Image (cartoon, rainbow, N blue to C red):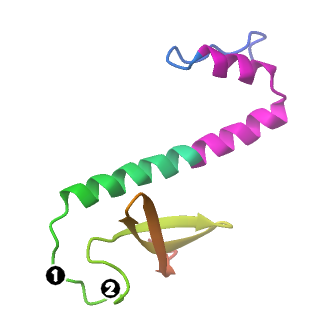
Amino acid sequence: MSSEPPSPPANLPTEIVNTLNEATSEHLRDAASYAEALAEYKEREARLEEEADDADVEERPDDLPDDVPAKAAITVKEINDNRYYYWQWREGDSVTSKYREPVNPDE
């Protein structure tokens, strides 16, 4: 292991680099976990918005509940080391989710 601290990515703002350099190792691990979850959330939001913009309303799938719009996408959420399918769609500025079923562990 190197005795030199790692170099930050060039595109990371200086104020973030400075804040991270002052943080404890525990806070850094918490920040890393939060940053990963936040990145996944933002990527999912962007994907849902893109799908909503591109989607032509298609026929309703047979397994789609009455209270879920046809434009809904299926996403996977991990909760307490278990994975679940959710219907997810945009309602105005917010994203709505509805539980569908657990993910088959063989998938």
Please, what is the three-letter code of the amino acid marked with disc 2? Leu
Quarter of the picture containing the N terminus is top right
Crowding around mark 2 (Cα neighbors within 10 Å: few <14, some 14 to 19, many 20+) is few
Label 2: element kind:
loop
Query: Is residue 31 one of those drawn in magenta?
Result: yes
Magenta region, main secondary structure: helix
For image coordinates 44% across by 71% down, the residue present is 107
Label 1: element kind:
loop
Viewer-proximal residue among 72 and 79: 72
Query: Is residue 32 one of those drawn in magenta?
Result: yes
Q: Which residue is mark 2?
A: 64
Left or right of 82 on screen, residue 19: right
> Which label sits on residue 45?
none
Q: Which residues are magenta?
A: 14-37
Q: Is residue 65 above or below residue 102?
A: below
Please, what is the three-letter code of the amino acid marked with disc 1? Glu
Q: Is residue 102 above or below residue 17?
A: below
For image coordinates 59% across by 43% down, the residue present is 36
For image coordinates 80% across by 35% down, the residue present is 27
Q: x and y percent of residue 97 in the render?
A: 47, 72
Q: CA distance from mark 1 to mark 2?
A: 10 Å
Q: Which residue is mark 1?
A: 59
For image coordinates 66% across by 44% down, the residue present is 34
